[in-house]
Image (spheres, helix red, strand yellow):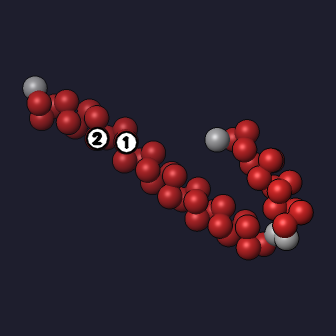
């Protein structure tokens, strides 16, 4: 029972963390490409997607 519960809890969590890490990487790449003014626009544009 305990082992099964742990598996069920762990499996959904891991991919979420992965996606979060990837998203962070992507965000930092974006930030380097844009100046301050454009960066603000970009962040507003990206926000609805997550």
Element on which disc 1 rests: helix
Q: Secondary structure at mark 2?
A: helix
Percent from the top left, x then y, of residue 46? Answer: 74, 48
Q: Is residue 11 shown left or right of residue 43?
A: left
Residue 3 numbered mark, or none: none
- For the residues bearing labels 1 and 2, Cβ distance under 8 angstroms: yes
Residue sticking out furthest to the bottom = 32
The residue under label 2 is: 10
CA–CA distance between discs 1 and 2? 5 Å
Q: Of 39 and 10, which appears nearest the observer? A: 39
The residue positioned 50% from the left and 58% from the top of the image is 21
Disc 1 crowd rating (10 Å Cα; few below 14, some 14-19, many 20+) is few
Q: Quadrant of the N terminus?
A: top left
* 28 vs 44: above or below: below
Relative placement, left or right, of 23 versus 31 is: left
Which mark is drawn over residue 13?
1
Asked if 25 appears above or below 3 in the picture, the reply is below
Where residue 16 sits, quadrant-wise, is top left
């Amino acid at each position: 029972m305990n082992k099964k519960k742990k598996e069920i809890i762990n499996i959904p969590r891991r991919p979420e963390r992965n996606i979060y890490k990837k998203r962070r990487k992507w965000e930092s790449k974006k930030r380097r490409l844009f100046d301050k003014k454009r960066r603000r626009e970009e962040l507003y544009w990206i926000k609805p997607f997550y």
